[in-house]
């Protein structure tokens, strides 16, 4: 347990990552309450009665100090720090609701990874638009190479607390840090959020290579050139280049592109084996951020005039019914160029 004073924290989202983060905070001695949608009342009952969340974290015991509810107003009104851990598609609607509920300024943290469809906006930008300035003391992105399944069993993990407000980033850093969960600070929230969102696209490609039967050489090429794409677009949008060499850049890219824990990698592997998007969604049963983010990233790259051939290829396979094997060959046959 760390020595940070106890805070009242709401975790909005009782999926695998939200539950794992709640567990970290509870083990740090924080007062934690989980919220999830009314349609997930069974999960709330299981958490409160059995102290487990078997749908999202199998064979993991949740600290008894963690309670769950479907009452958003109740959980937000009595908490000082709000941690949002839901799919990107639901962020704006939730933020609108929070703006109605919040009466006193809160620290707003998000641990989601994606870009909004249509607007292409980062999550912190959505939160800043929808939650009035007088209702928030700061916005923080909590991101990095972290599988919920490993955090839940106290495997060693390092992530980043990113905010333009370094004081708030520092507070969130100390809130989560302990002997197995190390948190660094970064003021480049633009780069941290873009790295987190865009690496999911490359992870889909990594899974597809595995599904097609390719080996380590192909994987190394994909990760390296994927990082180049992410960096090009990120810098065009105002990110610092060194951010992409950190935890939320190359770190998150490595862990997501090499592990079956990753839903994006799982989805890509199924694509490589010939499954349709509907079949993949049914098999995985949870949000696959890479398959939605690739739409926004492709459109952003076109708007900015940035070359992102891997992103373009994954978009074609996912949404234009391009043959995955032929698409890989097209990437390999591109005109030779300097690295």
Image: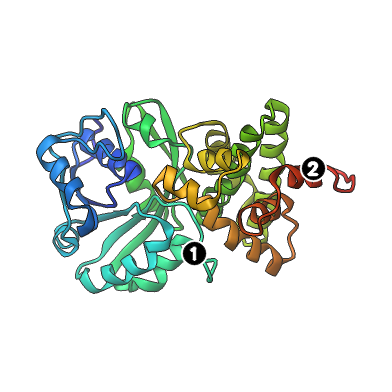
**Which quadrant of the rendered structure holds the C terminus?**
top right
Instruction: Using a 10 Å C-alpha cutoff, classify the residue at mark 1 as few (fewer than 14 neighbours), some (14 to 19) or many (20 or more).
Output: many
Q: Which residue is mark 2?
A: 329
Q: Quadrant of residue 97?
A: bottom left
Quarter holding residue 174: top left
Q: Can residue 187 be seen by looking at this rendering?
A: no
Residue drawn at the location 62% of the way across and 52% of the way down: 240
Residue 37: horizontal and vertical position, in percent?
24, 58
Tell me if 319 is positioned left or right of 116 in this view: right
Mark 2 is surrounded, within 10 Å at the Cα level, by few (under 14), some (14 to 19) or many (20 or more) other residues, namely few
SS for tag 2? helix
Pick whichever, 9 or 166, lies toward us: 9
User: Spatial distance from mark 2 to mark 1, Cα to Cα?
Assistant: 31 Å
Residue at screen point 15% across, 60% down: 71
Apparent side of residue 163 relative to residue 241 in the rendered image (left or right): left
Q: Position of residue 116 (x, y in %)?
A: 49, 64
In-front residue for pair 253/136: 253
Circles 2, 1 touching at the beta carbon (< 8 Å): no
Name the residue at the right extreme.
336
Q: Nearer the viewer, residue 301 or 170?
A: 301
Image quadrant in which the N terminus is located = top left
Answer with mark 2 or mark 1, whichever residue precedes in sequence.
1
- Secondary structure of the residue carrying numbered label 1: loop
151 to the left or right of 278: left
The residue singled out by tag 1 in the image is 116
Q: Nearer the viewer, mark 2 or mark 1?
A: 2
């Amino acid at each position: 347990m760390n020595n940070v004073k106890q805070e009242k924290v709401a975790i909005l989202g009782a999926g695998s990552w939200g539950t794992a983060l709640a567990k970290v905070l509870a083990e740090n001695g924080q007062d934690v309450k989980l919220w999830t949608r009314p349609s997930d009342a069974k999960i709330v009952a299981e958490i409160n009665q059995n102290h487990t969340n078997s749908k999202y974290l199998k064979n993991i015991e949740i600290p008894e100090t963690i309670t769950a509810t479907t009452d958003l107003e109740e959980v937000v009104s009595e908490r000082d720090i709000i941690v949002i851990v839901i799919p990107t598609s639901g962020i704006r609607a939730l933020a609108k609701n929070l703006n109605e509920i919040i009466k006193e300024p809160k620290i707003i943290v998000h641990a989601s990874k994606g870009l909004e469809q249509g607007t292409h906006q980062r999550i912190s930008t959505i939160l800043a638009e929808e939650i009035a300035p007088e209702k928030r003391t700061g916005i923080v992105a909590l991101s990095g190479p972290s599988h919920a399944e490993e955090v839940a069993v106290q495997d060693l993990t390092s992530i980043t607390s990113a905010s333009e407000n370094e004081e708030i980033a520092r507070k969130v850093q100390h809130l989560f840090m302990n002997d197995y969960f190390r948190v660094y600070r970064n003021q480049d929230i633009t780069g941290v959020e873009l790295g987190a969102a865009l690496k999911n696209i490359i992870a889909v490609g990594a899974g597809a290579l595995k599904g097609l039967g390719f080996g380590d050489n192909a994987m190394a090429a994909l990760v390296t050139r994927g990082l180049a794409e992410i960096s090009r677009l990120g810098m065009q949008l105002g990110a610092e280049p060194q951010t992409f060499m950190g935890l939320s850049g190359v770190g998150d890219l490595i862990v997501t592109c090499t592990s079956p824990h990753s839903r994006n990698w799982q989805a890509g592997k199924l694509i490589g084996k010939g499954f349709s998007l509907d079949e993949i969604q049914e098999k995985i049963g949870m949000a696959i951020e890479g398959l939605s983010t690739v739409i926004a990233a492709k459109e952003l790259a076109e708007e900015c005039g940035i070359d992102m051939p891997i992103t373009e290829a994954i978009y074609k396979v996912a949404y234009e019914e391009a043959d995955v094997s032929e698409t890989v060959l097209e990437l390999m046959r591109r005109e030779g160029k300097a690295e």
